[in-house]
Image (cartoon, rainbow, N blue to C red):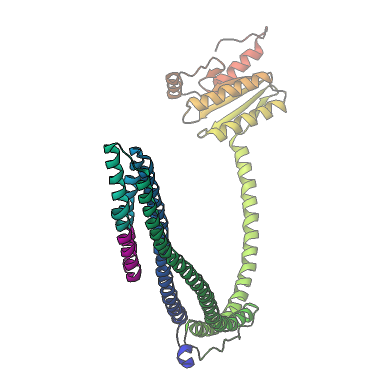
């Protein structure tokens, strides 16, 4: 059996343990259910007996009402006293019917109740009804005989006492039955509690024992696998797990671990070789990266020189500078043009700057706004900007775009701009001549 369990899977072992516990629970539940059914039957019997006792006490009260009302009428002749008598008799009929239903299945009680019914009817027919009828006759004749009625009343009272004695006997028997069944119920409840406690302890200990055995077996074998994995994690790739006899999931895990460990040991050797090769490649890559960084720095310096050369500033004389622009002007080049022009004006004594846009293929709104801004900046530095080299198509584009050219002077060619400056310099009064 142990060998068979050893070869079961973990799930099968858990199912087996759970099945054993379930069977124990079912047996315990059946035992407790049987005890509960018996307790329920005893409780119902006690309830029936209690109801019979209550109904018997109510019947005594109703019969007492009938007796007092009838005898009072016999003595006084007041008809109003017959109403409680009639009502009590009607209720006693319903109560006796209820008592007969309550004692069904109890032959002795049913027989005693039948005797009580006969005594009640005999007492009513032999004493109460004749007494009431005699009293009515005396009232009609107008000559009441109190002595006769008193004798009738005493006879009815003796009959009622015998009837009460018989009902009290029935009530005493029911009280004894109530006490007996209460004692049986208490004993049954104590036995049920004891059975419940014992069953719960057996189930608890059994379930704990079953799962402790399964958990201990599983934990012990898992610890062996974990120990081998810990040694491998510490760098011992020769670590192996020796759970070779177990065929459950843990045993399969141990086998898979051993296979993985052998593969990892092989891979580790290969990785060491590859690591050395990768380390050599990394050093070579770092050297190449340093070379690339140096080359990028050289390219950056060269690009800076190219940008400086793409926007040259040439002096014509001490007061005039020329900046020939070649190629398309984007936002970056416009900023560079403005920066170079302002720096040249700041570091020289020139008061005039000629922008030659002959080599600019397109002048749009953005370029025109940039040139206007340069004109305004130069004016703040005390210099004047002339724009030369405006071709017809450029002039048409500026007009079509609605660019305001009143901020600067324009000339078709560089020669015209220089000639204008020479004439202005040769003018005696220094005023500007027309172009």
Q: Quadrant of residue 435?
A: top right
- Quarter holding residue 205: bottom right
Q: Number of labelled discs?
A: 0
Can you give x and y, in whole percent of width and height, for residue 252 in the image?
Answer: 48, 84
The residue under the point 31% across, 38% down is: 143
Locate residue 390, reporting x and y percent: 49, 23
Q: Main secondary structure of the magenta part?
A: helix
In the rendered image, is residue 97 in sight? Answer: no
Left or right: 66 as drawn, with respect to 240:
left
Percent across and percent down for residue 306 are 60, 41
From which residue to which does the magenta span run? 98-119
For residue 341, say whether it is visible: yes
Can you say whether 427 is above or below 258 in the image? above
Name which residue lies at 58% across and 76% down.
Answer: 274
Residue 11 image point, x, y percent: 45, 79
Given residues 362 and 100, the one toward you in this image is 100
Residue at the image position 34 percent from the left and 54 percent from the top: 95
* Residue 107 falls inside the magenta stretch: yes
- Which one is in front, 77 or 392? 77
Q: Is residue 62 magenta?
A: no
Q: Please determine whether, in this image, residue 101 is positioned above or below residue 192.
A: above
């Amino acid at each position: 059996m142990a060998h068979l369990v050893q070869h079961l899977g973990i799930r099968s072992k858990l199912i087996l343990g759970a099945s054993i516990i379930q069977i124990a629970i079912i047996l315990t539940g059946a035992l407790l259910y049987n005890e509960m059914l018996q307790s329920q039957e005893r409780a119902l019997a006690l309830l029936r007996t209690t109801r019979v006792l209550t109904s018997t006490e109510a019947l005594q009260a109703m019969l007492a009402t009938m007796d007092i009302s009838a005898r009072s009428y016999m003595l006084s002749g007041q008809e109003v006293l017959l109403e409680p008598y009639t009502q009590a008799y009607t209720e006693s009929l319903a109560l006796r019917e209820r008592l007969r239903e309550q004692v069904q299945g109890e032959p002795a009680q049913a027989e005693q109740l039948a005797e009580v019914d006969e005594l009640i009817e005999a007492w009513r027919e032999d004493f109460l009804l004749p007494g009431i009828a005699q009293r009515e006759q005396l009232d009609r004749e107008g000559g009441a005989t109190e002595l006769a009625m008193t004798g009738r009343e005493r006879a009815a009272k003796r009959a009622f006492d015998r009837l009460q004695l018989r009902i009290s006997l029935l009530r005493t028997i029911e009280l004894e039955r109530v006490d007996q069944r209460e004692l049986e119920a208490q004993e049954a409840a104590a036995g049920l509690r004891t059975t419940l406690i014992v069953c719960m302890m057996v189930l608890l200990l059994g379930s704990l024992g079953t799962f402790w055995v399964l958990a201990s077996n599983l934990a012990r074998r898992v610890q062996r696998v974990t120990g081998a994995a810990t040694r491998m994690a510490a760098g011992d790739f020769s670590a192996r797990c020796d759970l070779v006899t177990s065929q459950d999931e843990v045993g399969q895990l141990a086998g898979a671990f051993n296979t993985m460990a052998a593969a990892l040991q092989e891979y580790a050797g290969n990785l060491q070789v590859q690591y050395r090769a990768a380390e050599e490649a990394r050093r070579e890559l770092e050297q190449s990266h340093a070379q690339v960084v140096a080359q990028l720095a050289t390219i950056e310096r060269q690009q800076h020189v190219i940008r400086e050369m793409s926007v040259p500033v040439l002096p014509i004389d001490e007061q005039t500078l020329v900046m020939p622009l070649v190629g398309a002007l984007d936002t970056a080049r416009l900023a560079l043009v403005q920066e170079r022009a302002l720096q040249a004006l700041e570091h020289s004594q020139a008061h005039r700057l000629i922008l030659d846009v002959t080599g600019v293929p397109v002048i749009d709104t953005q370029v025109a706004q940039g040139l206007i801004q340069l004109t305004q900046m130069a004016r703040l530095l005390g210099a004047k900007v002339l724009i030369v080299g405006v071709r017809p198509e450029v002039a048409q584009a500026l007009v079509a775009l609605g660019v305001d050219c009143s901020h600067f002077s324009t000339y078709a060619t560089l020669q015209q701009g220089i000639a204008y400056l020479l004439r202005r310099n040769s003018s005696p009064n220094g005023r500007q001549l027309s172009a």
